[in-house]
Image: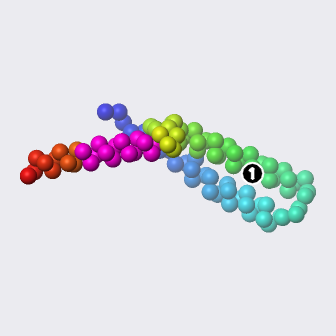
């Protein structure tokens, strides 16, 4: 059996602080239109875009990460039915 892929959490851990920095900058200086402020917002927005892109790549590299939500739900249903059938068979041997 193949080794499970370890989830790299560093990319996800960087998301929240970047989001907080972006929101704080835009709220703290609401209405400000200086070149320096606009450049700071653009820089944080680009950083946030990179962080989301990196996190998305990591999530998609996980087994099943390429599946749509509908495909994941169908797979979960199939596995739950398989589990229930196995439990039923196991219980039939106990009696």
Can residue 6 be seen in this snapshot? no
Residue 77: % across, % down: 38, 45
Q: Residue at x 84, y 64 (%)?
A: 30
Using the image, determine if residue 32 lies above or below residue 44.
below
Task: Out of 74 and 31, give the one closest to the viewer.
Answer: 74
Q: Is residue 2 visible?
A: yes
Q: Which residues are magenta?
A: 72-85
The residue lying toward the viewer, choosing from 49 and 88, is 88
Q: Can you name the residue that lies furthest to the bottom here? A: 28
Answer above or below: position of 28 versus 65. below
Residue for point 85% across, 53% down: 38
Task: State the residue at coordinates (67%, 43%).
Answer: 50
Tag 1's secondary structure? Answer: helix
Q: Position of residue 65 (x, y in %)?
A: 50, 39
Q: Mostly what secondary structure, the magenta segment?
A: helix
Give the residue pinned by disc 1.
44
Confirm whether the magenta stretch covers residue 9: no
């Amino acid at each position: 059996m193949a080794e499970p892929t370890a989830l790299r959490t560093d990319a996800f851990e960087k998301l929240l602080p970047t989001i907080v920095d972006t929101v704080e900058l835009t709220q703290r200086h609401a209405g400000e239109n200086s070149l320096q402020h606009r450049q700071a917002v653009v820089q944080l927005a680009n950083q946030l875009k990179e962080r989301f892109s990196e996190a998305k790549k990591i999530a998609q590299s996980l087994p099943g990460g390429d599946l749509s939500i509908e495909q994941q739900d169908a797979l979960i249903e199939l596995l739950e039915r398989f589990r229930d059938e196995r439990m039923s068979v196991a219980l039939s041997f106990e009696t």
